[in-house]
Image (cartoon, rainbow, N blue to C red):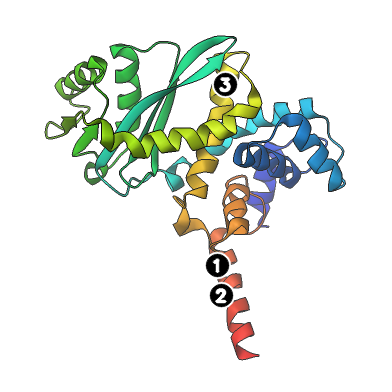
Amino acid sequence: MCPSCEGRALSDFKGRHFEGETVLWAVRWYCRYGVSYRDLEQMMGERGVSVDHSTIYGWVQKYAPEMEQRLRWQWRGPRSTSWRVDETYVKVRGEWAYLYRAVDKFGDTIDFYLSPTRNTAAAKRFLAKALRGLKDWEKPHVINTDKAPTYAAALAELKKEGKCPEHTAHRQAKYLNNVIETDHGKLKQLIRPVRGFKTRETAYATIKGFEVMRALKKGQARAFNVTGDIRGEARIVERAFGIGAGALAEAVQFISGRLDLQAV
């Protein structure tokens, strides 16, 4: 590890009783496999890591949002300008909150937003977030939604403000949203073991981890997955926190190893 990366890794996990690699291991597993905190406590115990489930919860709350933010530029790049937008429900302190989500026609995650309300203002905040930071050629030509009038009103306001391209068409065809409905179901499999969130802040922090790990699982950061497998996926996360070699050094090492095997 280079000195600057080592320093960054130390500062990210300063004050922790466990090494950064162990912390990220737990956060990744929780956000990728849909297990409870108590189950993960036992799974880590089998590997010789004695850590309480409440400690793992704290790790997820701190590092899942960091993971999503640091990897955002790697996983977030729509392959299609045809979007599918919909919202699903998440229980927060016994009440339903609304998780707005967008995927492209191939099912790749574009963005998400947790809101306590389901109205035009919430739809507008979500769509503005989804459009923010995209290159012109990445912005949607078509956005497909259900027949809720809030989306049409939100898109009209965003176009008027210059935040959404004028040429973007709004389509309302229920069958076209099958791809996002299926993706909702897979995300819900991760959320189910939580059995309800206590606050919207903790819900959103956890969901950020779920969403980024779903994106990586779908191969959305494939260009940064040096080995093209599950270990390469883990290394994407670790590199974001300065753990281990950089992507270039890792790629050189991987290619050298392959060449050595071929020479045998």
Which quadrant does the C terminus fall into? bottom right
Residue 51 locus on image (x, y percent): 84, 34
- The local secondary structure at tag 3 comes to helix
Question: Along the line of sight, which residue is nearer the eye, 262 or 67?
Answer: 262
Say what amino acid the circle numbered 3 marks: Ala
Marks 1 and 3, how far apart at CA? 36 Å
Q: Which residue is mark 1?
A: 251
| Residue under label 3 | 203
Dot 1, crowdedness within 10 Å: few (<14), some or many (≥20)?
some
* Residue 85 vertical position relative to residue 89 in the rendered view, above or below: below
Relative image position of residue 243 (x, y in whole percent):
66, 51
x, y (%) of residue 83? 28, 38
Q: Is there a contact, CB below 8 Å, between mark 2 and mark 3?
A: no
Labels 2 & 1 near each other (Cβ < 8 A): yes
The Cα–Cα distance between marks 2 and 1, rounded to whole angstroms, is 6 Å
First-in-chain label (2 vs 3): 3
Determine whether the residue tagged by mark 2 lies in a helix, strand or loop: helix
- Relative to the observer, which residue lies in front, 251 or 232? 232
User: Residue drawn 21% across and 23% down?
Assistant: 155
Give the answer, above or below, for where 164 lies relative to 264.
Answer: above
Name which residue lies at 72% across and 37% down.
Answer: 13
Q: Earlier in the sequence, mark 1 or mark 3?
A: 3
**For residue 16, above or below residue 256:** above
Q: Which residue is disc 2 drawn over?
A: 255
Placement of 27 over or under 52, stated as above or below: below
| Distance Cα–Cα, label 2 vs label 3 | 41 Å
Q: Position of residue 94 (x, y in %)?
A: 58, 9
Residue 111: quadrant of the picture: top left
Graded by Cα atoms within 10 Å as few (under 14), some (14 to 19) or many (20 or more), the crowding at tag 3 reads: many
